[in-house]
Amino acid sequence: MSVRVIVTGGTFDKEYNELDGTLFFKETHVPEMLVLGRNKLDVAVTTLMMIDSLEMTDKDRERILEACRTSPEERITHGTDTMEVTALRLGESMLPKTIVLTGAMVPYKFGSSDGLFNLGSALAFAQSLPRGVYIAMNGRCFAWDNVRKNRTEGVFEERKA
Amino acid sequence: MSVRVIVTGGTFDKEYNELDGTLFFKETHVPEMLVLGRNKLDVAVTTLMMIDSLEMTDKDRERILEACRTSPEERITHGTDTMEVTALRLGESMLPKTIVLTGAMVPYKFGSSDGLFNLGSALAFAQSLPRGVYIAMNGRCFAWDNVRKNRTEGVFEERKA
Amino acid sequence: MSVRVIVTGGTFDKEYNELDGTLFFKETHVPEMLVLGRNKLDVAVTTLMMIDSLEMTDKDRERILEACRTSPEERITHGTDTMEVTALRLGESMLPKTIVLTGAMVPYKFGSSDGLFNLGSALAFAQSLPRGVYIAMNGRCFAWDNVRKNRTEGVFEERKA
Amino acid sequence: MSVRVIVTGGTFDKEYNELDGTLFFKETHVPEMLVLGRNKLDVAVTTLMMIDSLEMTDKDRERILEACRTSPEERITHGTDTMEVTALRLGESMLPKTIVLTGAMVPYKFGSSDGLFNLGSALAFAQSLPRGVYIAMNGRCFAWDNVRKNRTEGVFEERKA
């Protein structure tokens, strides 16, 4: 089994600029994280864009959908921050693949990041769940049509109680 | 869905003794790791033993099996190092649960540990795989009756090519 | 010998806000860093302000000077980012104490921070240098009247070649 | 000003062997630590030996003394664990240099190491103290003829109350 990771940027990959003290994007940390996790799964990493998901446009989401569509792999994981919107767009397209979106609450480069935990979790769900689009965050997994981000508490939850 | 983590020690939880420079066990780091992963899944942690799995006896494995059997949860994850032996013992018992064993190549307290990646992955497999006993390590997942540790390379692999 | 650390905020102490992805100040990490360094020196920590030094006013610098003046200790270390300006103000006041300013290029909470190295260094200079005002950054130490930040390269250097 | 770091191994540089779970020596982490500390001081690093200081013989200490003697630099820092014995041997030799010994209670590769703090501190003392032999550990600095390791508490202290 092989999995493709499509990188779009997001909190996951933010770096600290030592010169001006801002956060910015340089390169994805996913390969480094796979090394840290001693990953032995067949994983291909594609960087599609490196942006803050707050700036992600409908056009960007079409590009993500297209990347999912043309990927030879059956199973795809990728990171983003306004994930529920992207999940919705991908879910409606009914691709015959298992697509798992993941991200991080805190950049990987911060010692206190949840990124490695989420990446491990997303790769596992991508291998074991049936076709469909999912969001995997902080130990849980949600179907694309039943998830929202609770912005007050900073957690993902089901839309329906 | 809820998952029970049964802790048995292993590399995962080794600490460094500042006084004499040896590695030892104090308490499990699993709760701390769940906090770091901002885990939102319903997870209960039980420490069954804190030993090096090289010292794990048949009697210890019976205790693990008993803990799996009596756990009210359907899905159980736990850590150990001679995992293939424990997996075999648990697999033969045919419990109607999803049991995922995981561990780490490097103690969690070392900056370079794969523990958080593996824990995220094991919790995901425990939620999504059908009943059975599995070993989840370094991005991959193996069935209990088809896994062995390649001690030369330090990786898990299928027994049959 | 005892040293007082006067905290003013700066890059050192920036935290990542998980809800909105900005950097902010909560509490100083100096006590936590002293624990990590297994510090055995008699150190008292006073938080005077928690601000970005780009926003530090002349009035703030007067408060720092006052804190240095009234501190019973002979030796004082503290963190700031427009350090050369603060060093100048403190240096001109000719207090009969050893004052060492330090900071960090990257927040302590980032795994890749130089903060712990600089804190160790500043506490050592504070114990061993004669009276005067100094900036200790990245292994080096500069007198207050001969230092500037090279903003292109992000390093401190002597004003005179 | 330039400083030479003479590496002898010790807790500082212990690595974790993923295959057999033991601690061992590979290469020194001092250069990596200097990069992390964004060190700008002129530092030369020499690896003299990579051993546990419990195994350090009188002959090894003669080699260290010789390395200190022949080093062109005036100021030398180096790491070891039975530091008081080495300090005594170097102190009696009355070399016209500032020599600072340092080490770590926990290997650098462990997230919870005091190594970076101690290295920053030792480099600072090496620049600022008069000629003589010193031990710099955990924020404090001791003269070679008035220091001992309190093995019960794992801290260095003055020999005389």
Image (spheres, coloured by chain):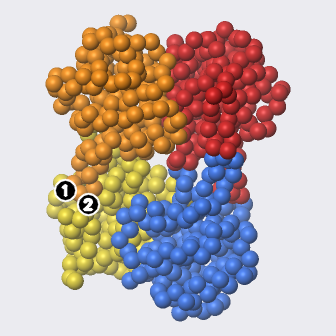
Chain colours: A orange, B red, C yellow, D blue
Q: Seen from this angle, which residue lies furthest top? A: A161
Q: Are marks 2 and 1 in contact (CB under 8 Å)?
A: yes
Q: Are marks 2 and 1 on the same chain?
A: yes
Residue C117 location (% of width, % of height) = 43, 63
In the rendered view, does A95 fall on the left or right side of D97? left
Task: Give the class, few, some or many, for how many residues have Cα within 10 Å of label 2's Cα (few <14, many ≥20).
Answer: many
Cα gap from disc 2 to disc 1, whole angstroms: 7 Å
Q: Quadrant of residue A3?
A: top left
Task: Give the class, few, some or many, for how many residues have Cα within 10 Å of label 1's Cα (few <14, many ≥20).
Answer: few
Query: Dot 1 falls on which chain?
Result: C
Q: Quadrant of residue D151?
A: bottom right
Q: Which residue is mark 1?
A: C54
Sequence order check: which comes first, mark 2 or mark 1?
A: 1
Number of numbered callouts drawn = 2
Residue C154 location (% of width, % of height) = 25, 63
Which quarter of the figure is the C terminus of chain A placed in?
top left
Q: Residue at x 31, y 64 (%)?
A: C67
Residue C4 seen in this snapshot: no
Q: Amino acid at mark 1?
A: Leu
Q: Amino acid at mark 2?
A: Asp
In the rendered view, does B122 fall on the left or right side of B37? right
SS category of the residue bearing label 2: loop
Q: Quadrant of residue D68?
A: bottom right
Q: Which residue is mark 2?
A: C81
